[in-house]
Image: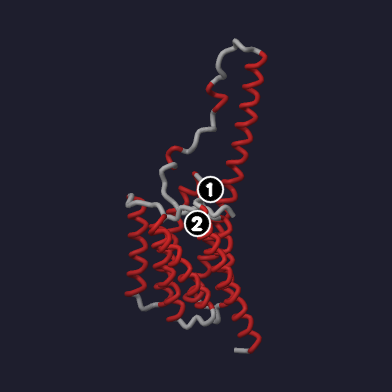
Amino acid sequence: MSMHAFDAHAVAATAGAALSLTGSALYLHGVRRGGTRPHRGSWLVWAVIGVVAAGAQGADGAGWSVVVLAVQALATVLVLGVAVRCGVGSLTPANLAMLAVAAVGVLGWTTLTDPTAATACAALADGAGLVAVVPKTWADPHSETMATYALAGITGLSATLAVDSVDPASLLFPVYFCLGNAGMATLIVARRRANRAGSSRSAVSGGTVGSSRSSRPFAGPAPLASLAGTAPLAGMAGMAGMAEPGA
């Protein structure tokens, strides 16, 4: 390995570790402010799988990329500690299914000798925690930290760039981590924009109804159809989740 390549990997790993710590700090700041409500089940999965992934990368001799994942695992464990104390989430069927998938992932890591298969199990389990947050994010995108997910996506990219050898075992988890978190950040942005657009339409509709009533005071109540689309997604309102430091 050349000195230039070594330096490039070191820089990518350092940047990824710094981004991971920054994202976790933003999340914890949101918890302290009271806006963030971490999902205990998801963060338990992410903490366990983060440790497993770092171990898988290290066992495969992944070099500098393991530094990024090790820092990520440590930061996730810290958030889990806070989630246990002041988070949300109960043993619903969906959460139990998520934990079951995570358990399969951990079992795969501890029993499979092939590094690629073991890392795939880690990615599958971590993804179960990510998928569990989607319904709650769809219903209330402000309950999640967009900046934390965006930084995690960049962290995954940094980990990918820091991989010393181009092989599936070393690349699988950081690539998944990049794409999964970037996708979640995109979902949060899209849902926030949709909610703002819906609020604007509701305000305009409300102003129109108010004007109509002023000009025709005995016209009676506005049709119920004019209020369509303003009700919350009641079917998702009870979903437990992580939360938003207001990024």
Q: Quadrant of the C terminus?
A: bottom right
Residue located farthest toward the top when viewing the structure as drawn: 218
Q: Residues within 10 Å of mark 2 (few under 14, many from 20)?
A: some
Identify the mark at residue 32; answer none if there is no mark: 2
193 relative to 48 in the view: left or right: right
Which of the 4 quarters of the picture holds residue 123? bottom left
In the rendered structure, find residue 58 and report the number of the disc placed on it.
none
Q: Please tell me which residue is depicted at 53% across the width and 48% down the height of the picture.
A: 141
- Contact between labelled residues 2 and 1, with CB atoms less than 8 Å apart: no
- In the rendering, at what x and y percent does residue 63 appear? 52, 82
The residue at the far bottom in this view is: 2
- Does residue 147 appear left or right of residue 114 in this picture? right
Residue 174 placed where, x, y %? 52, 70
Residue plotted at (45% across, 66% down): 78
The disc labelled 1 sits on which kind of residue? Pro
Query: Is 39 placed above or below 172 here?
Result: above
Identify which residue, 232 or 30, lies in the foreground.
Answer: 30
- The three-letter code of the residue at mark 2 reads Arg
Kind of element beneath mark 1? helix
Q: Is residue 76 above or below residue 190?
A: below
Q: In terms of image quadrants, where is residue 100?
A: bottom left
Nearest the viewer among 173 and 236 is 236
Picture coordinates of residue 125, whole percent (x, y):
40, 63
Judged by depth in the image, the label closer to the viewer, 1 or 2, is 2
Q: Quadrant of the N terminus?
A: bottom right
Tell which of 223 and 22 is nearer to you: 22
Image quadrant assignment for residue 107: bottom left
Q: Which residue is mark 1?
A: 141
**Residue nearest the observer in this picture, 124 or 44:** 44
Element under disc 2: helix
192 sits left or right of 43 in the view: right
